[in-house]
Image: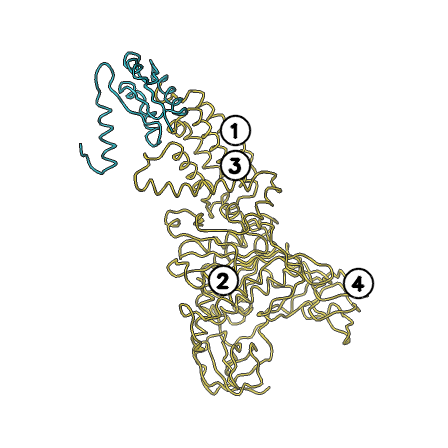
Chain colours: A yellow, B cyan
Amino acid sequence: MKKGTIVKVSGPLVMAKGMEHANIQDLCYVGDMRLVGEIIEMRHDVASIQVYEETSGVGPGEPVETTGEALSVELGPGIVSQMFDGIQRPLDTFKAKTDSNFLVRGVNIEALDRQNKWEFNATKTVGDMVEPGDIIGTVQETKVIEHRVMIPHGVKGKLTAIESGEFSLEDVVAKVETDNGETDVTMLQRWPVRRGRPFKKKLNPDKPMLTGQRVIDTFFPITKGGAAAVPGPFGAGKTVVQHQIAKFSDVDLVVYVGCGERGNEMTDVLNEFPELVDPNTGESLMERTILIANTSNMPVAAREASIYTGITIAEYFRDMGYSVAIMADSTSRWAEALREMSGRLEEMPGDEGYPAYLGSRIAEYYERAGRILTVGSEEREGSITAIGAVSPPGGDTSEPVTQNTLRVVKIFWALDSSLAQKRHFPSVNWLTSYSLYLDDVGKFMDQDLGTNWAEMVQHSMNILQEESELQEIVRLVGIESLSEKDRLTMVIAQQLREDYLQQNAFDDVDTFTSRTKQYYMLDLILSFEKEAREAMRLGAYYKEIVEGTTDLRDKIARAKFISEDNVEQIRALKDEAKELIHNIVAEGGMTQNA
Amino acid sequence: MAHKIAVVGDKDSVLPFKILGFDVFASSTPRIARETIDRLAEENYGVIYLTEAMAKEIPDTIKRYDAEVQPAIILIPNHKGSLNIGKSRIQKNMEKAVGQNIL
């Protein structure tokens, strides 16, 4: 193919003339080193190429060669438990090949291992009619993920050959008689990252995704197929929240995109995940995790691609009928990469220098999340839940990335630096956060637990809101000016905050709380409140109730450390509370004055 | 809305208030006083006069109604003389309201 010539190099942006045969979004090899790049703008015969590798040493006059193909990912067995860079190069193979701790340029590595043999079990037989998306066989990829091999898009007809056995990725496992002759089907598919994979129908995401994090599951729940934003200033715990969800959410597969954040955070994932046990399957977490790493010292342009690489892989597994969660940490770095490229392209800047199309790019990404019916004749249900961290500079959420994200996501977990400073973790601010799925999840939980969960959550939220109002008064005139009722509200709110919402991600038991335990814990605090209010009505004084229940409240505080196997102890504590408070009333409340 | 006025304290001190038409509740022990006040608070009493001698025994009860709009608990001297608790309470409230002691 005809080669173009570089006329300008500006950081990751390279301009080349003589490219009239190329198209926008084509993948190119740039310079003598054959760096990978993608065309993002065409003017006459001049192509602007964002290069996914470092460009120092590249100069005008060097050749550019287009592949004529869009940036694509390889999809097939061997993806799970891998760590890729932004353009899907497997990092461990990369290291073995280059013998370097850093990215060496111009190295071309296949995303998936072609040598490895996979045990393919055919589920269709010769003569079956198949259409795109139909599963023709399975491969046990890891202990927990069964890779379902699907008919690629554009192939429809009658199966003329299929067999089980050991195959490598490029071996033909089936043949399909289509209208235009016979097509070979392998276990390997390619898909351009910037195009969403098709589905039959989008469904309303109304089933909750359990994350094991109390503040999230109870007050700001996320659903399978929902999208959430986690904005927060640095040090507020965005990464820990993302890691926790990646560890404990009850999805089949997690794609974790480390996008422009510290390399150590990816190292944490690499160190921790293989040792952690998934509470849903009992196997190592790594068996269901795919990592995409573009840490802060890796090329900026590949950061832009990493998000798309991640979501395309997620869509592929969604199409198999899995529920997938994708975490992006952080989308602000991704937006900054867009900004850098836009600046170098000399485009007219929008708010804070971000490109004018920032909003549509963010929307494009989050819209690929959702709960759907897959294509194919058997209509599986799959979902992608997208959770994006946002790092607003200075914690000011009125900046463009946060605002544009909030426009498309329905869940907002606002991390608060003042809570983080008070060592309240997860530092999700209960007054500013919201989840628009609360009603749907409430209905689901009411049925699932057979209780008045939605009502309890609403009641607890009211207490917390009331507390913040009372806090204003206390700050002005002191705690003595509150009535006894209000002071009791403050005590209950404190219990909710410290004993329920605070959760230690680094404690073995507290790090994950099941749905039942959450219900028991919340119920314990609320029934304590109910008893205390009743006692007050019967004549007991605030001081007597508070002093009489010191030990009990201590036990309630420690309920979170009761392991999942012993949740019945929390139930017992509820009865204990009832009895104790009844005794206080029985003493006539005269412990002080008698 | 009209409110009633009650007087609580030892029998000797409170009885004369009956002439004025106040509801009088004699209480011999702190416990009875406390229960009486709690009961009156539930009913429609706007002002409760309480003898200082009795008030000294039940500080918690008085504190309880400090932050409530009604009833207002006003301390009065008993027949043996004043203990000065009532006056100092008024001074304290005044200080809270205007910021300095103006009396």
In the rendering, which numbered label is found on residue A575?
A: 1
Is A353 drawn above or below residue A512 in the view shown? below
Residue beneath disc 3:
A523
Q: Secondary structure at mark 1?
A: helix
Is B8 drawn above or below residue A29 in the view shown? above
Please report, as a chain letter, where disc 2 is located.
Answer: A
Q: Secondary structure at mark 3?
A: helix
Question: The disc labelled 4 sits on which kind of residue?
Answer: Thr
**Alpha carbon separation for disc pair 3 and 4:** 54 Å
Mark 2 or 4, nearer chain start: 4
Mark 2 or 3, nearer chain start: 2
Mark 4 or 1, nearer chain start: 4
Residue beneath disc 2:
A258
Instruction: Locate residue A578, reporting x and y percent.
Output: 50, 28
Mark 1 or 3, nearer chain start: 3
Question: The disc labelled 3 sits on which kind of residue?
Answer: Asp
Which mark is in front, 4 or 1? 1
Which mark is in front, 2 or 3? 3
Q: Is residue A423 left or right of residue A115?
A: left
Instruction: Locate residue A182, reporting x and y percent.
Output: 77, 74
Name the residue at 22% across, 20% down.
B83
| Pointer 2 and pointer 4 on the same chain | yes
Is A79 drawn above or below residue A301 in the view shown? above
**Alpha carbon separation for disc pair 2 and 1:** 47 Å
Which mark is in front, 2 or 1? 1
